[in-house]
Image (cartoon, rainbow, N blue to C red):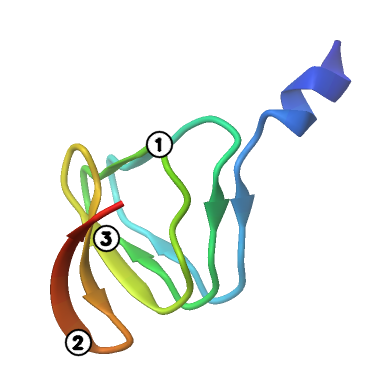
Amino acid sequence: GSEMCIRDSPTIGNNVIVNANSLIAGKVNIGNNVVVGGGTIVMKDIPDNCVVVGNPAYILYQNDVRVNKPL
C-alpha cells in the first residue's frame, strides 16, 4: 500500500540542491547542506555538508574540502 512507498522513500535534509537528471532512489538519507550534481545516481546515504557527483555517486567535497571519497 501507500505506507510502503513512504517508508521506502528518501529522506532529504534542509538546504539541499538536486540538479537536473539526478536520481535519488530507495530508503536513503540525504544530509543538510548537500548539492547533488547533474546526472548523479544516489543509492547510499550522504552526510551533511557535501557535494556529490557521478554514477555511482561519490563525495567530491565535504566541509569545503575536496575529498573524492566513495559513498
User: Which three-letter amino acid code belongs to the residue tagged 1?
Assistant: Met
Compared with 25, 34 (above or below) is below
Q: Position of residue 59 (x, y in %)?
A: 24, 63
Q: Residue at x 54, y 74 (%)?
A: 32
Q: Position of residue 53 (x, y in %)?
A: 20, 55
Q: Identify the element where label 2 is drawn.
A: strand
Q: Identify the element where label 3 is drawn.
A: strand
Compared with 37, 64 (above or below) is below
Q: Is residue 37 visible?
A: no
Nearer-N-terminus badge (1/3):
1
Please indicate whether residue 56 sits to the left or right of residue 11 in the image: left
Q: Residue at x 65, y 34 (%)?
A: 9
Please indicate whether residue 65 sits to the left or right of residue 30 in the image: left
Mark 1 neighbour class, 10 Å CA radius: few under 14, some 14 to 19, many 20 or more: some
Nearer-N-terminus badge (2/3):
3
> How far is disc 2 from disc 3 in space, using C-alphas?
12 Å
Please indicate whether residue 56 sits to the left or right of residue 2 in the image: left
Query: Disc 2 vs disc 3: Cβ atoms closer than 8 Å?
Result: no
Q: Identify the element where label 1 is drawn.
A: loop
> How far is disc 1 from disc 3 in space, using C-alphas?
12 Å
User: Of all residues shown, which one is farthest toward the bottom?
Assistant: 64
Pointer 1 residue = 43
User: Which three-letter amino acid code belongs to the residue tagged 3?
Assistant: Val
Label number found at residue 65:
2
Mark 2 neighbour class, 10 Å CA radius: few under 14, some 14 to 19, many 20 or more: few
Q: Position of residue 30 (x, y in %)?
A: 52, 57
Label number found at residue 52:
3
On the rendered image, what quadrant is the N terminus found in? top right
Please indicate whether residue 68 sits to the left or right of residue 23 in the image: left
User: Which three-letter amino acid code belongs to the residue tagged 2?
Assistant: Val
